[in-house]
Amino acid sequence: MKNKCIPMGNGFLFAYVTAITVLGIVPTAAAQEAAMWGFTPDRNLVSDEKDLPTKWDPATGENIKWKETLGSQTYAGPVIMGGKIFMGTNNQGLRNPKLTGDRGVVMAFREADGRFLWQSTHTKLAAGRVNDWPWQGVCSTPYVEGDRLYYISNRCEVVCVDTEGFRDGENDGPFKAEADTSDIDADIIWKLDMMAELDVFPHNLATCSPVGAGDLLFVVTSNGVDEGHFHIPAPFAPSFIAINTKTGEVVWEKDFPGENILHGQWSNPAYGVIDGKPQVIFPGGDGWIYALEPETGELIWKFDCNPKDSVWELGGRGTRNNIIATPVVYDNKVFIGVGQDPEHGEGIGHLWAIDATGKGDVTESGTVWHFGGQDFNRTMSTVAIHDGLLYAADMSGFVYCLDVKTGKSHWKYDTLAAIWGSPFVADGKVYIGDEDGDVAVLKVGKKLELLYEVNMGSAVYTTPVAKDGVLYIGGRNTLFAIETETSFD
């Protein structure tokens, strides 16, 4: 396996969303627009965008509006907000000659033409790959609300920056002595160092794509095992935290799964309203899903996403899996698949529909349906639910269409390459990228129909997104903006 980073979407990805409030994801006049991985806090990868392209060709420029160079490895983003596109990448697409070497980077581009605007960079942790795997960059897709952007750096920091950088001529944060305040550098508002302040020990990399609700930001800390994979250096350090978005102060923290962490914790939280009451969903490093009361962190319910006879073994040889995909909240249910670090290879996976209205341990009572065993493989991908159908993908390269109420399979499509990203549904199409760099366009519905397939020139580890009729695809080293009937000059 060439790359270590566990993708955030795990695919990693992102887009444009309506405003939310802490008690209900309800747009109000006072609320600000927000953007994030999964488009909305419930993380359902579906958009109402129309007139999106079905066909394009990076080799000839057909329907390519613009393209822009990223680093050499890209797993996070794009997320679109306020006329800007934000991407997590590494520093091998060097933008600032003063900031060289291996760094995690978040880049900002102008939505209209792809012009590079500014970047936020972070040097590597001294311990090396046990905490901060080389050349993986920033694998956190930002949460953006108003003019504030929140992400997790490769140094296991929760970082808040001004979306304008220094291009607005102001230093808005307390970091008045920042080394470089040119208009291509980030304006940091606050940082929370989870290793120094919370004793978190990230395994391989901190990757969470956070979600917000009101004044709270929810973060999976990536606390995990040591380099030998036997010992958990900080079992009672928090695995899940809520942070005040204005100050960066921790509001509450949870240490479960504690001593039951299997490997690393590379997933993302979701937020939704179940029977009129909000829940924040934490995918734990023990393979359990935990639903919490957002303001207090009080446990509402939990669910074991592996069969009771499953066994964890080092190197992925066992039958018990982590949760790397992001949970999706839909129709008072939570939908989630399980998998492992891609270096562990293929294996049997499971996809669950969970009744989110229960209390306590709902592993048996909360199972609406289960798709897995020999029918579904390990997955890092998040599902998309639209018009009674659920679209899922697994790491073995298969895309599935299931009935959302029953889990019945309608079709399976083989991309012939590993899938790290997730299916994106919009405009009657399902877009999905793979490790060979191909993007397939499938028709939505109960009948399998491949509309188009094209190679992007490098691996596609992210998930496509769209805004205002333009499709955005982040390849391993290039960001593409694609629209119907245009050409790249």
Image (spheres, rainbow, N blue to C red):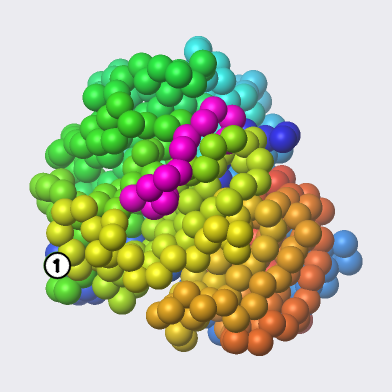
- Residue at which label 1 appears: 277
Magenta region: 304-316
Circle 1 crowding by C-alpha within 10 Å: few under 14, some 14–19, many from 20 = few
Single out the residue that lies furthest toward the right: 60
**Closer to us: 278 or 335:** 335
Seen in the image, is 415 located left or right of residue 139?
right
Q: Can residue 302 be seen in this view?
A: yes
Question: Given the image, on which type of amino acid does mark 1 rest?
Answer: Lys
At mark 1, the secondary structure is strand
Quarter placement of the N terminus: top right
Q: Residue 2 in magenta?
A: no
Q: Where is residue 192 in the image (x, y as percent from the top left)?
A: 29, 30
Residue at (67%, 63%) from the top-left corner?
A: 398
Q: Residue 306 in magenta?
A: yes
Quarter placement of the C terminus: bottom right
Seen in the image, is 104 located left or right of residue 216?
right
Please say if 119 is above or below 54: above
Seen in the image, is 190 located left or right of residue 460?
left
